[in-house]
Amino acid sequence: MGEVYERMDCMIGEIRDILLSNNKHVDDYAKMEEILVSRWVKMNITMHLGFALNPFFYDSKYLNVEAPGGIARHAPNQDREVVVGVLKAFDRIGEDENEKADLHRQLDKFQNKQGIFGTIHARIDATTMTHISWWSTYGSKTPELVEIAIRVLSQPISGSLAERVWSTYSYIHNIKRNRLNVKRANKLVFIHSNIRLLSRFTTSYKESPSKKWDINPESTYFDDSNVKLEDLR
């Protein structure tokens, strides 16, 4: 998760270099860039925190190499868009103002390489160790931040969630209900998916006869739903 933001940014720059170097599709670059940027703006909302907590992107050698497109690289804390995204994430993560303030102070120590983060070993290991191992080794002085960093950077990149949404979509918009317009279908999928997530916090999901009913994310049907309903009654 900590590499998606940077790689997507580099990909757009690489496409620019290819199309503007005497390519026959050079006239299509403006439209292509518009499509890529619009998609990037839509999907990078939750990527800022992973980018900002990746120690590799603060390495001086890495920052001295130009990004594709001849653009100078900047550390995450020097990118306004990233900083705003991180602050918004902390506002959602922090349970109260004191916890938010602690996260801000600990992030400042990490980004400005204060204390253990500024040691020669920490700087070298940032480019050789995995992100999780690095935080596990050097994050003892920032306990709240290291917990968030490990959780965020441990998330694998997978298309399973997208496949799950499409599975739900096929349940709502099927051959018997094919007159739904796109806007209405999207709303129903959104509601269905979020009700499923909220149900996991209820006691019935954990203890009732139908506990963990969605353990198989590809199945949205109950073969014996009527029987289970009668049992609950």
Image (tube, rainbow, N blue to C red):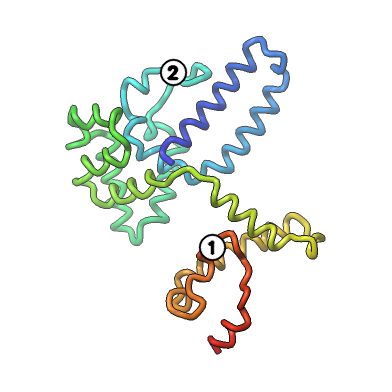
Question: Residue 197, how many percent across, how many down?
Answer: 51, 65
Image-based side of 42 in relation to 91, left or right: right
Image-based side of 72 in relation to 115, left or right: right
Image-based side of 60 in relation to 19, left or right: left
Q: Residues within 10 Å of mark 2 (few under 14, many from 20)?
A: few
Residue where numbered disc 1 is placed:
216
Quadrant showing the C terminus: bottom right
Residues at marks 2 and 1, CA–CA distance in whole angstroms? 46 Å
The part of the image, by quadrant, that contains residue 75 is: top left
The part of the image, by quadrant, that contains residue 135 is: top left
Above/below status of 141 relative to 184: above
Tell me the kind of residue under disc 2: Glu
**Residue farthest to the bottom?**
233
Question: Residue 23, how many percent across, how many down?
Answer: 67, 13
Which element is circle 1 on?
Answer: loop
Above/below status of 177 relative to 110: below
Residue where numbered disc 2 is placed:
66
Residue nearer the viewer, 63 or 212: 212
Q: Residues within 10 Å of mark 1 (few under 14, many from 20)?
A: few
